């Protein structure tokens, strides 16, 4: 039955970060007030200050804050909110939460609890899609979850197969199994990760489609029986089943294929009497056959690219549908114009296996120009904690063609300064510059096929890069000198009556140290001496952290920010973190020999596999740590005997905390 009209005047956003800010922007445009909820670590976050009102709901762990449904509903009642928007993640696909919101007399801006419950379980969803005639991947989605049955069904399906968490997404609980001897371990680890991430260890098995594209259809349904699709998004560039780059439209899409996939998605939505925004995800093989993967009963992270090519505000549409209005347009009214690409900026270190990275955001500067959009929920000075997903911002570019959007994205990423925690900015630039991406001829195997460990290694600074870093250090020191000597003319600081002083530096980048000197006779021209080599630089443009430098006839774009003794800098597509050892009291960090096992990041210990006295070999599993919703195995790098175990399951650890000591038998 059609929903009665219900004007929404105040929305509580049950989320954080960029999606909370995104929802609040549209609410403000519509004249609707917004309420933020926040955990203690998020007290100064942008979504808190952006809202008209804000309510503290608990400490950092999500179970005590953003997953605390009762606290969120109480906050809505306390502030007089009419509706709750769940964003994505957290409680967005929690049927019990949707039901509790409605029973509290509030409007849930999303689908019904029944639809969430059905589509939130991959096994039940797949069974319903088979009934609705939607193409599905062969597999097992039965209720018997015993290891014996799963192993038997895996053999029936044939390898390779995918093990998936039935209750969630985002790649958590998902494992690719190439052969039968790996299935039992994949079931065990997948179930454990699924239980920790979603509170359910239910699994499904599916035949692995070799090198498919991941293509999803955005659908929208109102409460008057109208269902439309808004075209597709290609989300094939993934790492560990987590999307990294998305775009609309799909590079290999044809009108006939779009019509077929769109119809399947609309049929899927109609089969469950859906309402609001939803996404039906498919695997598309090289022959043009497509298979239902899952349905996300919420707004997607990548929804901005659909907004850019359709001209629609999807959050405004969500609110409109929640108020009981009709969509106001038909399928024939939906047109796609231009091309849009989105990249996800993650707080992670690609040079260390993409380990999550935490710490303070020292600086976040963005490129402001037409066709460039940032969806963010962070600011300079904000702490990136280990409690939440590592995605900290999204960057979206739009152009008349795919190539125009790609080139604009490269420019925007190059001109984005996001310093402090390690990020995947350089990795994104490298992805966009690969021939396979440029051609559009790629699959979900794109990253595995295009990157080796060597490709992901930290960049090595050549003489020109060292010279640029030295000059950026020098100019930061110059500004400090000016601040201390305001009465001295800018051009006289660091100069003698005869010639510019040679300022010595000893730059440390990782374990590499380089002695050099900087000299300038003019604020725009510098000579950097590195051993016997001399490098000349000319500053073409300088605006705050942004600088364009010419050396040897080539222009280099650099962003830099000095935070204490640490200089964060980018040079074209490479990021560097360096310090001047002449300004420090001690040299670099000591390196370990593998006998002292430390936590690689902040997180929670899930399991410890060894005890004092155990004899171990290099490569043995020592422990599992969970950070930012992902589990990471800690492996031994030496042979020896466990001398001490300093942590236990459920313990919280900080980066570099000693967790296990190993006696290698060496003095």
Image (cartoon, grey):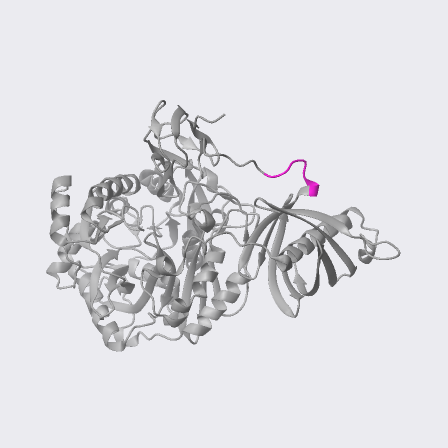
The residue positioned 67% from the left and 42% from the top of the image is 581
Horizontal side of residue 303 vs 465, given as left or right: left
Residue 565 percent across, percent down from the top left: 65, 43
Q: Is residue 511 magenta?
A: no
The part of the chain drawn in magenta is 582-588
Image quarter where the N terminus lies is bottom left
In front of the other: 48 or 425: 425
Q: Is residue 584 magenta?
A: yes
* Vertical placement of residue 374 versus 69, above or below: below
In front of the other: 165 or 302: 165
Horizontal side of residue 227 vs 67, given as left or right: left
* Vertical placement of residue 648 versus 453, above or below: above
In front of the other: 646 or 304: 646
The quarter holding residue 665 reads top left
The residue positioned 39% from the left and 61% from the top of the image is 450
Residue 405 percent across, percent down from the top left: 45, 70
The kind of secondary structure the magenta stretch mainly shows is loop
Residue 130 percent across, percent down from the top left: 12, 59
Asked if residue 620 shows in the view, the reply is yes
Residue 455 percent across, percent down from the top left: 45, 56
Considering every residue shown, the one lying at the far right of the view is 497
């Amino acid at each position: 039955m059609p929903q009665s009209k219900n004007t929404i005047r105040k929305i509580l956003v049950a989320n954080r970060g960029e999606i909370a800010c995104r929802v609040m922007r549209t609410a403000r445009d519509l004249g609707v007030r917004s309420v933020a909820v926040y955990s203690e670590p998020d007290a100064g976050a942008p979504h808190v200050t952006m809202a008209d009102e804000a309510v503290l709901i608990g400490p950092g762990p999500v179970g005590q804050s953003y997953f605390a449904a009762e606290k969120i509903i109480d906050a809505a009642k306390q502030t007089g909110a009419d509706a709750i928007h769940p964003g994505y993640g957290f409680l967005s696909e929690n049927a019990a939460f949707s039901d509790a919101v409605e029973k509290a007399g509030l409007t849930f801006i999303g689908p019904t609890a029944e639809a969430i419950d059905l589509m939130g379980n991959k096994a039940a969803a797949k069974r319903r899609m088979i009934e609705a005639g939607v193409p599905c991947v062969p597999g097992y989605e039965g209720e018997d979850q015993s290891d014996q049955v799963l192993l038997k069904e895996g053999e029936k399906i044939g390898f390779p197969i995918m093990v998936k968490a039935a209750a969630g997404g985002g790649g958590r609980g998902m494992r690719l199994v190439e052969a039968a001897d790996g299935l039992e371990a994949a079931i065990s680890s997948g179930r454990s990760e699924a239980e920790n991430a979603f509170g359910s260890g239910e699994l499904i098995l599916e035949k692995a489609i070799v090198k498919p594209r991941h293509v999803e259809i955005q659908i929208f349904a109102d409460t008057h029986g109208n269902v439309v699709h808004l075209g597709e998004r290609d989300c094939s560039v993934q790492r560990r089943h987590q999307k990294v780059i998305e775009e609309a439209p799909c590079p290999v899409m044809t009108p006939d294929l779009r019509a077929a996939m769109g119809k399947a998605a609309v049929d899927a939505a109609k089969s469950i009497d859906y309402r609001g925004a939803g996404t039906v995800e498919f695997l598309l093989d090289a022959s043009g056959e497509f298979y239902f993967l899952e349905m996300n009963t919420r707004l997607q992270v990548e929804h901005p690219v659909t907004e850019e090519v359709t001209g629609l505000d999807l959050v405004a549409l969500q609110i409109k549908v929640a108020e009981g209005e009709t969509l106001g347009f038909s399928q024939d009214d939906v047109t796609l114009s231009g091309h849009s690409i989105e990249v996800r900026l993650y707080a992670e270190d690609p040079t260390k296996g993409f380990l999550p990275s935490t710490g303070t955001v020292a600086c976040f500067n963005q490129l402001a120009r037409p066709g460039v959009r940032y969806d963010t929920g962070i600011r300079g000075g904000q702490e990136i904690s280990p409690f939440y997903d590592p995605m900290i911002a999204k960057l979206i570019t739009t152009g008349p063609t795919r190539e125009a959007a790609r080139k604009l994205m490269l420019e925007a990423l190059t001109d984005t300064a996001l310093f402090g925690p390690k990020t995947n900015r350089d990795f994104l630039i490298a992805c966009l510059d690969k021939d396979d991406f440029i051609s559009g001829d790629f699959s979900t195997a794109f990253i595995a096929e295009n990157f080796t460990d060597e490709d992901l290694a930290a960049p090595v600074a050549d003489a020109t890069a060292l010279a640029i870093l030295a000059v950026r250090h020098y100019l930061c020191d110059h500004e400090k000198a000016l601040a201390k000597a305001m009465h001295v003319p800018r051009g006289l600081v660091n100069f003698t009556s005869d010639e510019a002083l040679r300022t010595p530096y000893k730059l440390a980048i990782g374990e590499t140290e380089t002695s050099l000197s900087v000299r300038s006779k003019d604020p725009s021209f510098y000579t950097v001496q590195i051993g016997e080599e001399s490098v000349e630089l000319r500053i073409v443009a300088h605006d705050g952290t942004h600088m364009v430098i010419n050396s040897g006839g080539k222009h280099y774009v650099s962003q830099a920010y000095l935070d204490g003794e640490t200089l964060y800098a980018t040079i074209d597509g490479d990021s560097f973190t360096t310090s001047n050892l002449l300004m420090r009291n001690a040299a670099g960090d000591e390196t370990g020999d593998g006998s002292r096992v430390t936590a690689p990041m902040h997180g929670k210990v899930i399991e410890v596999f060894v005890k004092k006295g155990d004899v171990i070999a290099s490569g043995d599993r020592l422990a599992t740590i969970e950070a930012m919703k992902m589990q990471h195995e800690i492996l031994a790098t030496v042979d020896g005997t466990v001398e001490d175990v300093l942590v236990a399951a459920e313990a919280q650890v900080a980066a570099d905390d000693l967790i296990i000591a190993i006696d290698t038998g060496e003095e």
